[in-house]
Amino acid sequence: MTISSESIDLHAVKSALKKEQNKILWRQIMTNGSLVVGFVIIAFLILVALFGPLLMKHDPNTMDVLNRFAAPSADHWFGTDNLGRDVLARVIYGARISMGIGVVVAIIASMSGLIVGIYSSYYKWLDHLLMRLSDGIMAFPGLLLALALMAALGGQASNVVIAVSIVATPYIARVVRSEALALKEQTFVEATRALGASDSRIIWQHIAPNTLSSLIVQATFIFAEAIIVEAALSFLGAGIPPPAPSWGNILSDGKTYIYKAWWMTFFPGMTITLAIIGLNLFGDGLRDLLDPHVSKAKNNE
Amino acid sequence: MPGHETATHTLLEVKGVKKYFPVRGALGTTVQEVKAVNDVSFQLKRGETFGIVGESGCGKSTLGRTILRLTEPTAGQAIFEGTDVFSMDPTALQTLRQDMQMVFQDPYSSLNPKKRIGAILEEPLNIHNIGTPRERTEKVLKILNTVGLQTDHYYRYPHEFSGGQRQRIGIARALMMDPKLIVCDEPVSALDVSIQSQIINLLKKLQRELRLTYLFIAHDISVVRYISDRVGVMYLGQMVEQAPTDAMFANPRHPYTRALLSSVPEPKLHAKRERIVLREELPSPLNPPSGCVFHTRCPMAKPECKKMVPVNKELSAGHFVSCHLY
Amino acid sequence: MNSATMDNEPILKVDKLKTSFKTERGKVTAVDGVSFDLLKGEILGIVGESGCGKSATAQSILRLYDEKQAIHEGEIWFEGKELLSLRPPEMDKVRGNDISMIFQDPLSSLNPVFTIGNQIAEAILIHKSISKREAYARVLELLRLTGIPAPEKRINEYPHELSGGMRQRVMIAMALACESKIMIADEPTTALDVTIQAQIMSMIVELNQKLDMGVILITHDLGVVAEVCTRVVVMYLGQVVEEADVENLFTRPLHPYTQGLMKSIPQLDCDRSKPLLVIEGTVPSLHQIPEGCRFATRCPFADDLCRSKMPPMEQYAPGQRARCWHAETISKKGEAIRAWT
């Protein structure tokens, strides 16, 4: 049993096994309807957000005063708004803003929620402190709290991100905390302590990775929520300052002219709806994919 | 000859160990205590297997965990090779972990589902910085073989294995740091009967080959008898009797031991023997009976059993009993 | 114990029972052509390990599975009725009434928010239209019958206030509530301490004799089987592999699996210096059932015939059947010892 022969064997074994494991994973993904449909929708929207501006002929801010309130036509697929701006162009740029904010919020809330959740589950005194803080935050309706924070911080894109992240963090923290609490009681955690592992090793190498599946699912829902909250904030005038075409701002512009120019609210509204549906489907599909992983395995016995 | 000497050398001496769990009242004060382990003493010699049997609530699992300091003891000492585990500082305890390991009961939750077997097994070596990465992998492969698994299992995940195989992995993990003592906490209880014998044989083989010492905790009396050199019987946090295996089973002295042994259903015909039925129910460990902890159910209880705690006496070589009958 | 088999009519006849489930990985047949009879007054043991289908068989008899997920084939005859073809309301009348069942974990089998008196009374009132007072009187009677001390006090207690052994007695009381003709006990003592197990098992035997109630005892513990059962059915991977009187099963087990099981269990008087006998390998998954004899992958006597053709259940001795091509030759002592040790 020489060293070299073992390592050669291992590499071959490793790649063969990884191939096998990936094949199984791929099959699980492909048979998951929600996941696939959700993913397609989100991927489509992301692609549009990233590359749409290159393909469009109109600029979101160019005002064509003569062509105000134009109904959807071949030239303006989504019509024009009260200042003659192309609604389609605005919606596409808005995707960048709104979805961009959604992603950043999801990421920030995930990281802070993970830290808060995990440490709360592990140290009792921290638990009391952090959970009461979270309860306080969650006691406010999310939108109102975000509104209040925006009033305090000032209307800027970065503040929208901060405000919505603060509102979203407790939800992720709770999910992570309850997973972590259950995991803490699992035998493998005790076994790792018996090996001499330190608290931080157990927390970050054993408990945290096992909370990731729930975390990611929650994060997709936070992404969706963030889009809605941003839209609501902007709609109320407390979000991204106009003329930036965030979806909320477009809706806000359109609200006075609903009867005159329905396309000003319809199209951005439908886009938001599409994004939310896509994200929710993706999140549901992801949950189905990731959670029964362990219970299915048990059933194999 | 070195082997001969280590056979009689005491590896672990457990003295007066107590573990009480506080029950907190509304204001966070301790209202009651669950006396899970209540003054247990015994000795474990190098190379032998000490089996601990008892029914639910007797504290045997808690005893195992307390000895390894997976839970902090309330009182007592656990002297491992001359040093008291209970009074060690964290750094010394950390090093000690290499010598004292545990095999757990539930094969399904004792392995991190998200980690590959290789990673799970290398972890103890990583934690204690033993060897180079290549040496660690080498060792893992070697131990995988020792426990009857294959090299390509290195990259698999726990869920791809059966209960028996997972238990082998658990045993492999305990062996990674070449421990001297392994506490086996119900290692075969969760396995199918036809797999149990595989694991039991493996444990025995490993003991011979690696000169291991086992503290074997289980509720299955036949299994404990088979694998142990000495057996201790626990009831409600106390060790009521301990003796070399053959002596214990040939001549159980404590009334509880007798009742316990008489209840074991034997897979053979016409094995009907006088079944000793215990009256009353198991008392709560929140409020153990006064005097002899068994007196409420003992068919031979005398008035003094309620008043005085029996002294642990050695009746014959290595055969200790705590009972007023003697 | 029972030799008058002539007037011993089967009270339950399971004929080629098949239960399959639709899973994501295809159809899984947990019970594959299982047949056995339960004779009047006997305690029949069904022994096997996880995945053998013993619990699935029991649940199929009472049709406890959601029939959108589980497909049953075969026939189950009880009192002239074929249970699998009864309409749901008719089957409801059988469950808990004519045939009752007790489960492994009494804590999760009892509803935590109702008193035990309430739950036992419910078992009665579902099937019998008597007054509440009469039902409660019967509850006290049942509690006494199952050896629960101070029944008047216990009747108002909640499941969590009782010990494991007591809870199991309550389960048994519920099972007896309607004077069932058959009680199916699914691993009733596995979750209990050995001293309590002994009490519960002796109570079941007593009830079987006193009330002339047939018992189907499902267990993995051969010790319990030896003490309590009159006849035994051994299952492996969804099939019956041996069926015998308890005497014959322990003196002359025919099927290699039965032999292996018996020899691999450490007994209280076994030689501690000899290694335990081991049945090599593991039980195959129900998703990947091997060709031919299902035990061939682990059997020391297996040959090409075993691996290609499934052996049928054959009678090799009075009252003893086995599913093995080589049962005849193996049963000659010499063969058995040589291969297994």
Image (cartoon, coloured by chain):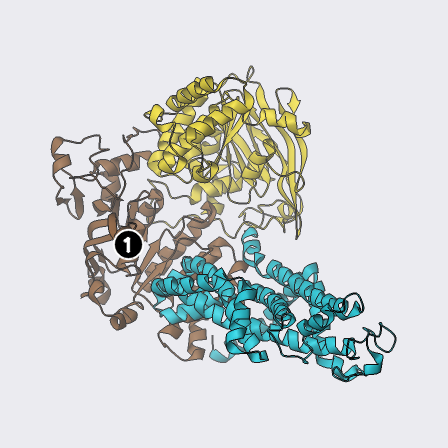
Q: Chain of mark 1?
A: B
Q: What residue is drawn where x is 34% and y is 27%?
A: C153
Say above or below: A10 vs C97. below
Quick one: quadrant of the C terminus of chain B? top left
Instruction: Tell me the brown chain.
Output: B
Q: What residue is drawn where x is 17% and y is 31%?
A: B301
Chain A's colour?
cyan
Type of amino acid under label 1:
Gly
Quick one: quadrant of the N terminus of chain B? bottom left
Residue furthest top as drawn: C7
Instruction: Find residue A110 and report its horizontal and vertical position in percent.
Output: 52, 70
Q: Residues within 10 Å of mark 1 (few under 14, many from 20)?
A: few
Front residue of C57/A211: it is A211
Say above or below: A184 vs A236. above
Q: Which residue is mark 1?
A: B28
Front residue of B209/A70: it is A70
Instruction: Find residue B276 and report its horizontal and vertical position in percent.
Output: 28, 30
State left or right for residue B115 relative to residue A202: right
Evaluate whether residue B264 shows in this view: no
Chain C's colour?
yellow
